Image (spheres, grey):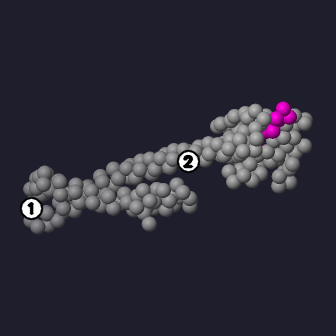
Amino acid sequence: MYRKANGLDEFYSRTKAKESVELFIDLNGNPTIDYPHVHIVHKQNGNVDVIASYSKGNHIWQTTLIDPDGKSLAHVITQARDKIIDKIKEDREILTGDLESKIEAFINDDAVKYRKEVEEKMYKNILHETMKKGLDEEAAIKLLEKDSIKEAISNKVGEFEEVRRQDMRKSLIDSLPEGDIKEKLKKKHLIN
């Protein structure tokens, strides 16, 4: 016998040939047809299987209780629920890390291109302005090749680059759907 859920051909409880009665409950203890869930199988012999089902065919934990009392069963159901919650947290940490590393890789790729473009533009602008003040091109180029000038340009571009990185990071994080991953990244990067 299947108890249909939402009028669909899915079930949240069933009886199998009088050998077992099964129930799927969500993390709040309510009957469910969705994953993840705790799958409880009451067998005719009095034993009870408790299975932490993370996704279809993915049972991350299970145990069998021999003729348990209600308190023991409730404790093991809580253990299964906790295993699912731990797996959800672990997967979110992995997803957050993967997402963050992809965001940072994108920003770094952009920063390399940006730095090159801005340094070239600054170099050309300074060369142009220097030549306007009366230096010939050769003397102006020689002046720009001094380490102190190169360092000054690099430092200034670094300031622009950091602002660009922060703006881009904020924009990418803000574009994520609302949820705990977005909030975690915003908090980590001090984005309001």
Q: Nearer the viewer, residue 60 or 118?
A: 60
**In the depicted structure, whether residue 96 falls above or below residue 67:** below
SS state under label 1? loop
Q: Give me the disc on residue 173.
A: none
Alpha-carbon neighbours of circle 1 within 10 Å: few (<14), some, or many (≥20)? some
Q: Nearer the viewer, residue 68 or 15?
A: 68
Q: Position of residue 101 (x, y in %)?
A: 44, 47
Quadrant assignment for the N terminus: top right
On the image, numbered disc 1 is attached to which residue?
Answer: 135
Q: Amino acid at mark 2?
A: Lys
On the image, numbered disc 2 is attached to which residue?
Answer: 89
Alpha-carbon neighbours of circle 2 within 10 Å: few (<14), some, or many (≥20)? few
Q: Is 144 placed left or right of 55 in the picture?
A: left
Q: Position of residue 10 (x, y in %)?
A: 82, 47
Q: Position of residue 64 (x, y in %)?
A: 73, 33
- At x 82% / y 55%, what residue is drawn? 6
Magenta run includes residue 55: no
Extent of the magenta region: 38-46
